[in-house]
Image (spheres, rainbow, N blue to C red):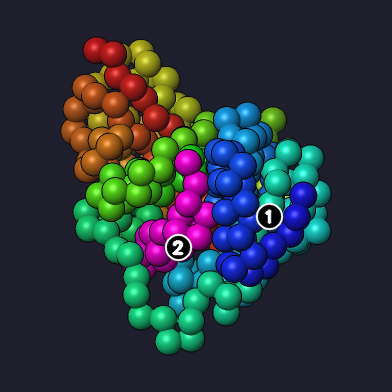
Amino acid sequence: MQIVTTIEELRSIVKWWRGEGHSVGLVPTMGYLHEGHKSLIVKAVSENDRVVVSDFVNPTQFGVNEDLSSYPRDINRDAALCEEAGADVIFHPEPEEMYFSDNCTFVDMDRLTKGLCGKTRPTHFRGVCTVVSKLFNIVTPDRAYFGQKDAQQLAVIRRMVRDMNFGIDIVGCPIVREEDGLAMSSRNTYLNPKERKAALILHKSLSLGEEMIQAGEKDAVKVKNAIVKNMKTEPLARIDYVELVDGETLEPVETIEGPILAATAVYIGKTRLIDNFSYHSVF
Ligand code: AMP
């Protein structure tokens, strides 16, 4: 496996692969990889001849008071995990390689980016759409892999690919959790032992809502209120949002009749964690 730091070198590797008739998969990440990322890489390896994992803490998707400088980084550990998972290239550029100092072009989206995480992080999805578009243009993959863990991001990328005719298959992958239910995240490293325990409230509360729906509850407000009530039993948790939305448009729903996404963001101490479940209604 190769670690590549320049766009030019990556382009020439992909060109060579294409000449050999190989299909190419891309797994975009911000590094500090864990088993959740690994599941995406393993899937990409099983479906493509060659796989690129991008490992880049993208500055444009962080707000001014967010954790860009403290975001965890460990390229050696990441490289070992990628190699083990069977990736061919890890693309690890410096910010200066990805963005000209006078960069003034961004990819932005209406509607889907305004609710959920977009309310608290108004510039986040502009950064995500911009960097993912750039990676798509650099790697020109056949398929790209994204986790359901970031469900809004997955919906936004699917919509961007449709609207901008990227012609890339977007493959969504299930959430990988710790044994006790906490969704794996690079940001879990911020949690102290007390907070780590408290963080279980996200999955516990969402599971309660999921059980209500499975038992036949169709009133989205009732489900949301039950999730919020349970979340509030944890003194270290401060809710950013709990929402039940249409799985595709991400518009809030009142009645659960089609596929829905129940998503939450919660501060545990200073750490903002997200989690969700999807329910494909069969009523
Ligand atoms: P990140 O490095 O956090 O930007 O994540 C890179 C990709 O890995 C995104 O598509 C995430 O949705 C995905 N991912 C992160 N955590 C998990 C997880 N616990 N399970 C599945 N996918 C994940």
32 to 217, vertically: above or below? below
Residue displayed at 61% across by 42% down: 20
Q: Quadrant of residue 227?
A: top left
Residue closer to the observer: 140 or 104: 140
188 to 93, vertically: above or below? above
Q: Earlier in the sequence, mark 1 or mark 2?
A: 1
| In this rendering, position of residue 260 left or right of residue 189 | left
Q: Position of residue 151 (x, y in %)?
A: 42, 42
Residue displayed at 35% across by 13% down: 215
What kind of residue is marked 2?
A: Lys
Say if disc 2 is inside 8 Å of ligand 1: no
| In this rendering, position of residue 253 left or right of residue 37 | left
Q: Quadrant of residue 3?
A: bottom right
Residue span colored magenta: 122-142
What kind of residue is marked 1?
A: Ile
User: Does the magenta-highlighted stretch encompass residue 134?
Assistant: yes
**Circle 1 is placed at which residue position?**
90
Q: Quadrant of residue 201?
A: top right
User: Does the magenta-highlighted stretch encompass residue 278?
Assistant: no
Q: CA distance from mark 1 to mark 2?
A: 16 Å
Residue displayed at 34% across by 34% down: 261
**Circle 2 is placed at which residue position?**
134
